[in-house]
Image (cartoon, helix red, strand yellow):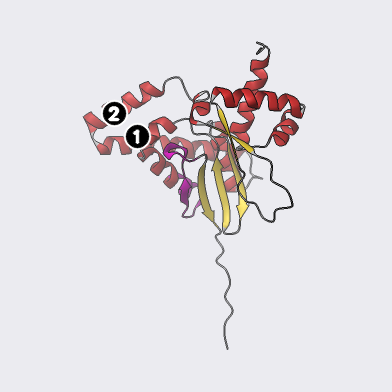
Amino acid sequence: MIQATDQPTRERVARSILDGGPSTAAALADRLHLTPAAVRRHLDQLVEEGAIEARDPRPRGHRGRGRPAREFALTDAGRDRFDQAYDDLAVQAMRFLAETGGPQAVRAFAERRATGMEQRFATVRESNPELEASEALARALSEEGYAATVRDVPVGEQLCQQHCPVSHVAHEFPELCEAETEAIGRMLGRHVQRLATIAHGDGVCTTCIPDTQPPTRKVSR
């Protein structure tokens, strides 16, 4: 029988997956200071509810012997738990804007929203001058509910947004994603490329931030 007192912990498990991305049971137990047995009990219930799904992890470098532990990721239904209660209203409002003002009105709204992100970014940078631009951007986005992180990759950096508060709206109106990507490029002062978006069915919004320093070439003599 499911105890009522289990629900807050179960929500913590789901929130940890939202913030940290697909995670193994061991990683969740470590982050939440729970026993592996307790975490697995909550994971089993979340899988049964359709809030999360188990999947094989993506290859990360050299694998040792044995099958790697499975990771648990949020499903669309699981993400719905954290989305605003006004998604339907927002979509209806955007449809009305498109019908009455045309595509240019939708684009103008998307750009206005992106400007707000830039203002948040500027505030974070001013308050935290020790942060790199990409780190400040991740923090600014996280404050807006995007659960963003940045990590190094061979070609530069990669911005990962584990959550998108407007994914349902952006699914129908991709102008929101397009304006956001352009704003990210302006904030970081370089051309960036969106590799994946939650709005279009990917698990994480991923943006490639290329290194500003081109590789050096040997001069033949």
Which of the 4 image quarters holds residue 85? Answer: top left
Q: Which mark is residue 172?
A: 1
Spot occupied by residue 84 in the image (x, y as percentages of width and height): 47, 23
Q: Earlier in the sequence, mark 1 or mark 2?
A: 2
Query: Label 2: which residue?
Result: 95
Q: Are marks 1 and 2 in contact (CB under 8 Å)?
A: yes
Task: Choose mark 1 or mark 2, whichever is in front.
Answer: 1
The magenta region covers 183-202
Q: Looking at the picture, which amino acid does disc 2 mark? A: Arg
Element marked by disc 2: helix
Q: Which mark is residue 163?
A: none
Q: At 56% across and 49% down in the image, what residue appears?
A: 158
Residue at the far front: name it. Answer: 66
Spot occupied by residue 3 in the image (x, y as percentages of width and height): 67, 11
Q: At 72% across and 32% down in the image, what residue appears?
A: 31
Q: Is residue 16 above or below residue 3?
A: below
Q: Distance of mark 1 from mark 2, alpha carbons?
A: 9 Å
For the C terminus, the image quarter is bottom right
